[in-house]
Image: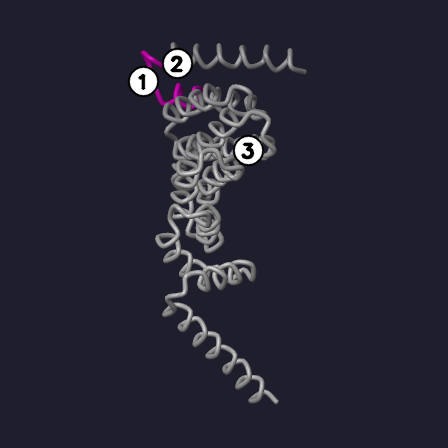
Amino acid sequence: MRLFTVLFFGTVFFSSCSHFSKVLKSNDYDYKLRVADKYYADKDYNHAQQLFEELFRVFKGSEHFEDIYYKFAYCAYYLKDYANAENLFKGFVEVFPNSNKAEEMDYMRAYTFYKQSPKVDLDQTNTTKTIGFMQAFINTHPGAEKTKEATDIIDKCRAKMELKDYRSAQLYYDLQYYRAAAVALNSLMTSYPDSEKSEDYKLLIIKSDYQFALQSVEEKKKSVLGRSLYNAMSFSIVFQKAS
C-alpha cells in the first residue's frame, strides 16, 4: 500500500512537471495566460510567477497587462521575495496611477518593508522605512480602508524601535558606562515623549547620574551629585503630580 502511494504521487509529480514543461515551450500566449491564471488561483505561485514573468513582456500595453502586473507582484510577495515585491508594487502604482488597485498596491509596498522588519536587536532600517512609507500612505490616501491598520503598524514599529533604544541604554548602564547611559536615556525620552515608560527612563537617568557622580574625581563629584539630586527631586515632583 505504501509503495503504491509513493508510486501514485510520483506519477502525479512527473506528470505535473511534464505538463508545465510543455506550457513553457508553447507559443500560444493566450493559453499560457490561462494556465498562469489557473496556477495563481490554485496558489501555485512558483509556477505562476515563471509564466507571468514571460507574459509580462508579451502583453505589455495590452488589456491584460494590468492584471498580469498585479498577479506577478503578488507572486513575489507570496513567495516571500519582499524586495522584488516592493519594486513591483511600486512599479504598478507608477504605471497605473488611476487604477482601482493603486491604493492597495501603495499599501502593499509599505507592507513589504514591515515584513522585512527584523528582531529588535538587529538593524532597524526596514522598520524606519515602514514608518515612513505607512505615514506616506496615510497622507496620500486620506480615509482609506487600510488607514487604521497602517496606524497600528506604525505604533508597533515605533514600540520596537523604542525597545531597541532602551536596551542599548540599559546595556550602557549594565556595563557601567553611566554617562553614556544617561545620554542615551535622555535621547530616548526626547524621541518618545509620550512613552508609557517615561517614569522608568527618568528613574534610570537619576541612577546613571548618581553612579557617574560616584566615579567622578573629587573636584567634579560635587557638581555631578548636585545634578543627580536635582534630577531626583524633579522626578519626585512629576511623579507626585502624576499620582
From the image, state whether disc 3 or disc 1 is nearer to you.
Answer: 3
- Residue beneath label 3, please? 150
Q: Quadrant of residue 227?
A: top left
Direction right: furthest residue: 243
- Viewer-side residue, 106 vs 215: 106
Q: Is residue 172 magenta?
A: no
In front: label 2 or label 3: 3
**Residue type highlighted by circle 1:** Val
Q: Does residue 213 appear anywhere in the picture?
A: yes
- Cα gap from disc 3 to disc 1, whole angstroms: 51 Å
Q: Which residue is mark 1?
A: 217
Residues drawn in magenta: 209-221
What residue type is disc 3 on? Ala
Element under disc 3 = helix
Residue 97 vs residue 115, the one in the foreground: 97
Return the residue nearer the eye: 1 or 10: 10
Residue 166 spot, x, y in % from top left: 47, 31
In this rendering, is residue 209 above or below 119?
Answer: above
Residue 234 lies, with reference to residue 84, above or below; the image says above
Q: Residue at x 48, y 19 (%)?
A: 206
Query: Could you give the CA–CA distance between mark 2 and mark 3, rounded to whole angstroms?
Result: 45 Å
Q: Going 49% across and 53% down the picture, which residue do you hit?
A: 78
Q: Is residue 216 magenta?
A: yes
Which circle marks residue 104 in the picture?
Answer: none
Using the numbered discs, state the Cα–Cα distance from disc 2 to disc 1 in whole angstroms: 10 Å
Q: Nearer the viewer, mark 2 or mark 1?
A: 2
* Mark sitting on residue 224: 2
Residue 177: give x, y in percent of width and height.
Answer: 37, 29
Considering the image in quadrants, where does the C terminus appear?
Answer: top right
Mark closest to the chain's N terminus, 3 or 1: 3
